[in-house]
Image: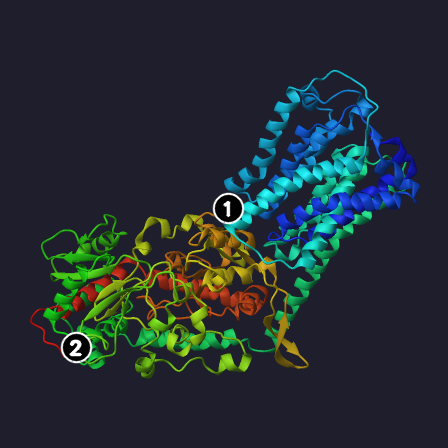
């Protein structure tokens, strides 16, 4: 029950409003990085705040009683104060870890203990286990409102639920053990308990534990640079909120504190960052319940009681403003699309022509295919070519002639004779820690034999060859080849006439470059390669000022894009990079434009984990109208602040709008098409998050954990519920790409790596390419989701990509490619072949 004095004096309403307003301001100012340091300063400031208000109370009688003191049945136990300190600290640590539900559940013991020290003067007895269990006890006023944010804000994975509930459960068990051993008999005392004494005692204990927690975080995990003014201001409002909450605990039913705390957390959630309108609306609605709980607890005879409903404007104003902004942005995009041809429409139209040319120019007969091979490469096809052609035709391969990617990779090795190639392969295998598998295919052997100096798991390379070539055993020549065990590419080929390293007489050398910048190394031969590069983007990019990708080969070319040096983890700080410089034939699943790896389909494309299952897909009309991606922080190893430049971290930073940067949109302005800069990013259109943070030193893992809003584990088919699905590089190529192509969703692809299928996948027909800078992504997503033309385009690309996948990326098509690759490798290492 309420202290009669503050109930009569009207202080009750002012205490509630002051507590809510100070807590709301603190929530608006709060950040996960500053959570612990600001909480520590808040508790250190608390005695000062109490002293200031005591002086104010000397001239204001309405505040005097709650500040000076009240009668209590017993002194506050130091042991219980330590538990309060532990509760507050656990709550703060949960907030720093982005676990809002856990932070509130951790405060339950705090409130139970404060009830023990505030209610006896009215009830005349200590709190006991029987009272806690009684359904009429006001513990339910604490637990039920606390359940609202846990249900509303918790990440609904097993990890998220466990982290939300465990702090409160553990501390409640500890509290219950103490309560169980506490005498329950009634006793009276006239001891005066002053709020300044309680605040001072709590401040010392909470600050002590927070100081330890902060020290652990700063020393073990990370160190932060803070804006002193911002942290002090945040600490001041936190201290004020704790001061008013402590006053309420001492003089009012303590269940009101949980309701206030719950309301301030839910009502200040930014609706702009939510990935769905329903989620944003649920937060606004959920804030209604704790506010109603607060008002219900206040005595009914107070006239100003109903006026507290005006506090619903705290969540409603941002929510309505966000809805208005989204509506205006969608209207602007639709208006531009109706008045002008969007760059994407032009790109799609040109791409369709390119795709038609690709299909029409394929040879229709063996004689034509042989003649085309001779014309392209200036030499006759390898032995076994006719059997390969029959195999490709029998499996309805739409691609017969376009295998330039194999020829381009093997052409440097023609300067070596077959015996030299074999000798180099043997010599490479003798190098310690070479991380290469030696695989052999024999006419007579039933299986591919892959060996490694010390590894037993070949990452399914043997399975790949056996699966793809099983039906042509007996037609294949005897051949041996080297396969890269690592995700990252391996080979840099010097542009010398005889293949010898320019600074050495050796044919190759190994260099360990893991976890360090490699840009200068992998681009050092750009001058010699420049004549073979594309000329860059077309005028579309220049006219609209956005880097829409027209030719992926140009977009991936390191020699004409020096800005890529700080945009990708592979060039900034690769997890493993054991460079082989020299003419060494190594098969790799993905390679940089300047490197000489021979491209091989990834075993991931035939593994069950990455295969498309139509039963888990949904029709286009039932998919969420947004862009989806969830994954881990692979792609580079974070040893300092360089993780901010990695491709995945940059993408998630943009999608979660963590930097509040200026984005470029195409809009109608003064009767003409123009660019508009805005810090607004429609969070409804992006369902993007990290699910695991690793490949980093512990300090920088912690930095990323505090910076990003991580999710729990996501189902492998969750992406198929969205219309747009994003795919980008990890340490190497992405194994999920084919699943996305086969689905009814539209793949958006960002990559710096070349793959074997690059010649047969046409951008803007089968997928949507995205630049490394991501500068065009906000406009691209808005166009494809928020305009009628864009949605039709996105659906058409999804359907075309799906249809082409089942024609050109089947397991049979991988077999056609690998079969031809094996024939070329066999000729390359033929002992009778002379250097040319």
Front position among marks 1 and 2 = 2
Which disc, if any, is residue 772? none
Quarter-of-image position of residue 101: top right
Residue 729 lies left or right of residue 591; in this view the side is right
Depth check, front residue: 115 or 303: 115
Q: Secondary structure at mark 2?
A: helix
Q: Which residue is mark 2?
A: 415
User: Residue 740 versus residue 397: which sits nearer the camera?
Assistant: 740
- Report crowding for label 2: few under 14, some 14 to 19, many 20 or more residues within 10 A (C-alpha): some
Residue where numbered disc 1 is placed: 712
Residue 327 lies in quadrant? bottom right
| Residue ID at (74%, 51%) | 236
Q: Is residue 288 left or right of residue 693?
A: right
Identify the secondary structure beneath mark 1: loop
Q: Position of residue 743 (x, y in %)?
A: 42, 57
Between 364 and 209, the one lying in front of the other is 209
Q: How many marks?
A: 2
First along the sequence among labels 1 and 2? 2
Residue at 25% from the left image edge and 75% from the top image edge: 494
Residue 504 location (% of width, % of height): 21, 74
- Residue 148 in view (yes/no): no
């Amino acid at each position: 029950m309420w202290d009669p004095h503050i109930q009569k004096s009207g202080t009750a309403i002012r205490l509630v409003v002051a507590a809510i307003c100070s807590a709301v301001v603190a929530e608006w100012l709060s950040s996960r990085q500053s959570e612990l340091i600001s909480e520590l300063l808040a508790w250190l400031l608390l005695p000062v705040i109490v002293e200031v208000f005591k002086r104010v109370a000397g001239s204001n009688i309405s505040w005097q009683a709650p500040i000076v003191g009240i009668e209590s049945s017993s002194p506050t136990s130091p042991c219980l104060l330590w538990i309060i300190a532990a509760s507050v600290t656990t709550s703060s640590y949960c907030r720093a870890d982005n676990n809002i539900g856990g932070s509130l559940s951790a405060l339950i013991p705090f409130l139970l203990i404060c009830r023990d020290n505030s209610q006896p003067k009215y009830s005349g007895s200590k709190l006991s286990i029987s009272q806690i269990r009684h359904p009429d006890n006001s513990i339910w006023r604490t637990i039920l409102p606390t359940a609202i944010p846990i249900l509303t804000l918790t990440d609904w994975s097993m990890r998220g639920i466990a982290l939300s509930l465990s702090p409160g459960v553990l501390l409640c068990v500890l509290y219950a053990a103490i309560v169980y051993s506490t005498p329950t008999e009634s006793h009276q005392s006239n001891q005066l308990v002053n709020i300044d004494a309680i605040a001072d005692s709590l401040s010392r204990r909470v600050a002590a534990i927070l100081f330890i927690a902060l020290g652990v975080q700063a020393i073990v995990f990370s160190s932060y640079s803070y804006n002193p003014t911002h942290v002090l201001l945040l600490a001041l409002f936190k201290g004020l909120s704790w001061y008013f909450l402590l006053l309420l605990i001492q003089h009012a039913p303590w269940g009101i504190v949980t309701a206030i705390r719950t309301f301030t957390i839910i009502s200040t959630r930014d609706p702009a960052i939510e990935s769905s309108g329903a989620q944003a609306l649920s937060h606004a609605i959920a804030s209604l319940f704790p506010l109603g709980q607060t008002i219900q607890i206040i005595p009914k005879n107070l006239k100003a009681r109903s006026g507290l409903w005006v506090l619903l404007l705290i969540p409603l104003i941002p929510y309505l403003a966000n809805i208005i902004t989204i509506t205006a942005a969608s209207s602007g995009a639709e208006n531009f699309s109706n008045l002008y041809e969007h760059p994407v429409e032009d790109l799609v139209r040109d791409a369709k022509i390119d795709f038609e040319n690709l299909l029409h120019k394929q040879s229709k007969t063996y004689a034509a295919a042989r003649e085309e091979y001779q014309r392209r490469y200036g030499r006759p096809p390898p032995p076994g070519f006719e059997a390969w052609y029959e195999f490709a035709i029998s499996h309805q391969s739409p691609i017969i002639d376009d295998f330039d990617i194999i020829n381009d990779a093997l052409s440097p090795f023609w300067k070596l004779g077959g015996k030299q190639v074999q000798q180099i392969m043997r010599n490479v295998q003798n190098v310690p820690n070479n991380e290469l598998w030696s695989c052999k295919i024999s006419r007579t052997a039933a299986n591919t034999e892959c060996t490694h100096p010390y590894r037993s798991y070949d990452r399914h390379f043997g399975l790949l060859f056996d699966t793809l070539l099983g039906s042509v055993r007996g037609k294949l020549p005897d051949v041996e080849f080297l396969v890269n065990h690592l995700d990252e590419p391996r080979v840099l080929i010097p542009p010398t006439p005889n293949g010898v390293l320019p600074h050495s007489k050796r044919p190759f050398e190994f260099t360990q470059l893991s976890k360090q910048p490699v840009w200068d190394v992998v681009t050092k031969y750009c001058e010699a390669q420049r004549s073979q590069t594309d000329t860059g983007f077309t005028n579309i990019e220049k006219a609209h000022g956005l880097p829409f990708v027209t030719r992926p080969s140009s977009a991936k070319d390191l020699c004409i894009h020096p800005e890529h040096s700080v945009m990708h983890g592979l060039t900034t700080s690769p997890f493993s990079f054991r460079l082989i410089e020299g003419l060494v034939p190594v098969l790799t699943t993905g390679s940089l434009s300047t490197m000489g790896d021979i491209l091989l389909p990834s075993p991931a494309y035939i593994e069950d984990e990455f295969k498309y299952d139509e039963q888990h897909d949904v029709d286009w009309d039932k998919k969420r109208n947004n862009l989806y991606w969830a994954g881990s922080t692979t792609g580079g190893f974070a040893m300092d602040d360089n993780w901010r430049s990695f491709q995945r971290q940059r993408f998630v930073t943009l999608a979660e709008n963590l930097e509040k940067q200026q984005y470029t949109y195409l809009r109608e302005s003064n009767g003409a098409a123009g660019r508009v800069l805005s810090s607004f990013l429609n969070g409804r259109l992006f369902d993007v998050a990290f699910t695991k943070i690793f490949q980093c030193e512990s300090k920088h893992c912690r930095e990323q954990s505090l910076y990003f809003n991580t999710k729990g584990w996501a189902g492998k088919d969750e992406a198929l519920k969205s219309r747009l699905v994003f795919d980008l590089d990890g340490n190497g190529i992405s194994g999920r790409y084919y699943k996305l192509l086969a689905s009814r969703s539209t793949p958006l692809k960002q990559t710096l790596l070349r793959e074997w299928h690059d010649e047969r996948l046409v951008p803007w027909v089968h997928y949507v390419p995205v630049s490394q800078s991501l500068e065009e992504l906000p406009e691209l997503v808005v166009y494809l989701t928020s305009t009628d033309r864009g949605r039709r385009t996105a659906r058409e690309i999804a359907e075309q990509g799906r249809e082409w996948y089942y024609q050109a990326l089947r397991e049979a098509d991988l077999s056609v490619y690998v079969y031809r690759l094996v024939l070329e490798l066999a000729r390359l290492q033929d002992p009778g072949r002379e250097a040319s």
